Image (cartoon, helix red, strand yellow):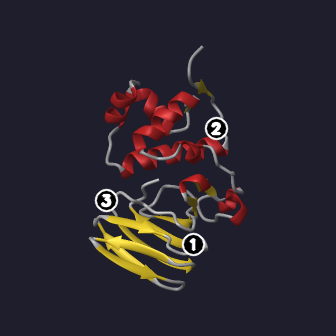
Amino acid sequence: MTSTAVRPEQDNGERLLAGDIRALRKARGLTLSEIALKLGRSVGWVSQVERGLSVPSLGDLRAFAELFGVPLSLFFSHDVPAEKERGVVVRAGSRRSLGTSESGLVEELLSPDLGGSFEMLRSVFAPGAELKTEARRPTEEAGYVASGTFEIEIGGVWHRLGEGDSFRFEGKPFRWRNPGTEPAVVIWVVSPPVY
C-alpha cells in the first residue's frame, strides 16, 4: 500500500491543498528538488502533489508542516467555497483557524488562499499572552488593532496600541504581548505569505 492516492478527478479541497503547498514552497524560495530532498521523496511526487494529482498521506502532511514551519491544522481546514467565490471570497464561518487557545494566539486566515503576494489574518491574542522570544521574518507586515490593547516591540522599541491604531514594519525583529484583561484582535497583513 502506498502513502498517496492518485485520482484522475481532483475535488476542490484537493486543489486548495495543492495550491497551498505550492504557495508555501514558493514563499520560502525553495525548489521542487530541495523539497524532495528534505522530505526524502522524488521531485515527480512533489510536483504531482503541487498539481493535485497525488494526495499526501497524514505523515506527508506532517512533514510538509514541519518543513514549512506551519501548524498541521492549516492543511485540514478547507471549507470548499462555491466555484464563483473560490479565490475571491472567504465567508466568516469558513475561515481556516491556526493555533489554539492554549497558545494564547488564535489566527484565522482571511485571505482566500496562500497564493498571491500577501496574506491577511485575524489574530486574537488572549489576555496576558506574549511572544517572549524575538521573531524576525523576511517580510513586510502591517496590522490594525480592531479591539483591545496590544503591545508590539519592533526593532527594540515597544509600542502600546489600542482600538483603531495600526503599525507597519519590514524585516525587523519583533515581539508582542497583550497586557490587557480582554482579548486583543488585530488584523495582520504579511507579505509574502508565511502560512
Point out residue 159 in the picture as x, y percentages from the top left corner. 38, 79
Residue furthest to the top in view is 1
The Cα atoms of the two marked residues, 3 and 1, are separated by 21 Å
Residue 31 in the figure: left or right of residue 119: left
User: Of marks 2 and 3, which one's residue comes earlier in the chain?
Assistant: 2
Point out residue 195 in the picture as x, y percentages from the top left corner. 47, 53
Residue furthest to the bottom in view is 164
Residue at the image point whose x is 62% and y is 43% from the top: 76
Residue at the image point whose x is 43% and y is 48% from the top: 24
Point out residue 61 in the picture as x, y percentages from the top left corner. 53, 35
Residue count near mark 3 (Cα–Cα under 10 Å), binned few <14, some 14–19, many ≥20: some
Marks 1 and 2 in Cβ contact (< 8 Å):
no
Asked if residue 32 shows in the view, the reply is yes
Q: 69 or 21: nearer the eye?
A: 69
- For disc 1, the marked residue is 185
- For disc 3, the marked residue is 136
The Cα atoms of the two marked residues, 2 and 3, are separated by 37 Å
Can you say whether 78 is above or below 167 in the image? above
Q: Quadrant of residue 140?
A: bottom left
Marks 2 and 3 in Cβ contact (< 8 Å):
no
Secondary structure beneath disc 3? loop
Under mark 3, the amino acid is Arg
Under mark 2, the amino acid is Gln
Under mark 1, the amino acid is Val
Point out residue 101 in the picture as x, y percentages from the top left corner. 61, 56
The Cα atoms of the two marked residues, 1 and 2, are separated by 36 Å
Q: Quadrant of the N terminus?
A: top right
User: Of marks 3 and 1, which one's residue comes earlier in the chain?
Assistant: 3
- For disc 2, the marked residue is 10
